[in-house]
Amino acid sequence: SVVGVISRDGAPQAGSFAADAGATFPSAFDADGELMAELGLGALPYTYLIDADGGIAHVQVGPVADLAELEGLVAEHLGVTL
């Protein structure tokens, strides 16, 4: 499953970002940055790959360039083909 978390933006910007990105997965809204603070993050974007046991399999700092890169990361770190 994929879940997006949009942090430190206003609700209109968050919705616009998800729509502009063509997101077809659910997104959560972290308006005050509480989740970012809890994870110790200071900048965006971060991509977390979570394994079937709920553990963090990989953290990508910075943007994922395209679908091919995401597919490669998922295959490498989760052993799953998208």
Image (cartoon, rainbow, N blue to C red):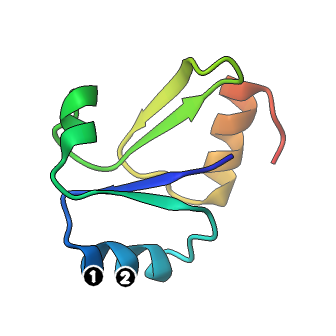
| Residue holding disc 1 | 12
Label 2 Cα crowd, 10 Å radius (few <14 / some 14-19 / many 20+): few
- Residue 43 shows which numbered tag? none
Above or below: residue 35 compared with residue 33: above
What kind of residue is marked 2? Answer: Ser
The answer to which of 6 and 60 lies nearer the viewer is: 6
**Residue 11 spot, x, y in % from top left:** 27, 74
* Residue 7 shown left or right of residue 77 in the figure: left
Label 1 Cα crowd, 10 Å radius (few <14 / some 14-19 / many 20+): few
**Residue 6 spot, x, y in % from top left:** 34, 59
Residue at 48% across, 55% down? 4
Q: Quadrant of residue 31?
A: bottom left
- Helix, strand, or loop for circle 1? helix
| Residue holding disc 2 | 16
Report the mark closest to the observer, 2 or 1.
1
- Helix, strand, or loop for circle 2? helix
What kind of residue is marked 1? Answer: Pro
* Residue 56 shown left or right of residue 76 in the figure: left
Residue at 18% across, 34% down? 37
**Residue 73 spot, x, y in % from top left:** 63, 36
Residue at 62% across, 48% down? 70
* Residue 20 shown left or right of residue 23 in the figure: left
Above or below: residue 11 compared with residue 53: below
Q: Are marks 2 and 1 in contact (CB under 8 Å)?
A: yes
Above or below: residue 50 compared with residue 71: above
Q: Name the residue furthest right.
A: 81
Q: Quadrant of residue 80?
A: top right
**Residue 60 spot, x, y in % from top left:** 44, 36
Residue at 38% across, 78% down? 15
Per the model, the C-alpha gap separating discs 2 and 1 is 6 Å
* Residue 55 shown left or right of residue 71 in the figure: left
Above or below: residue 1 compared with residue 19: above
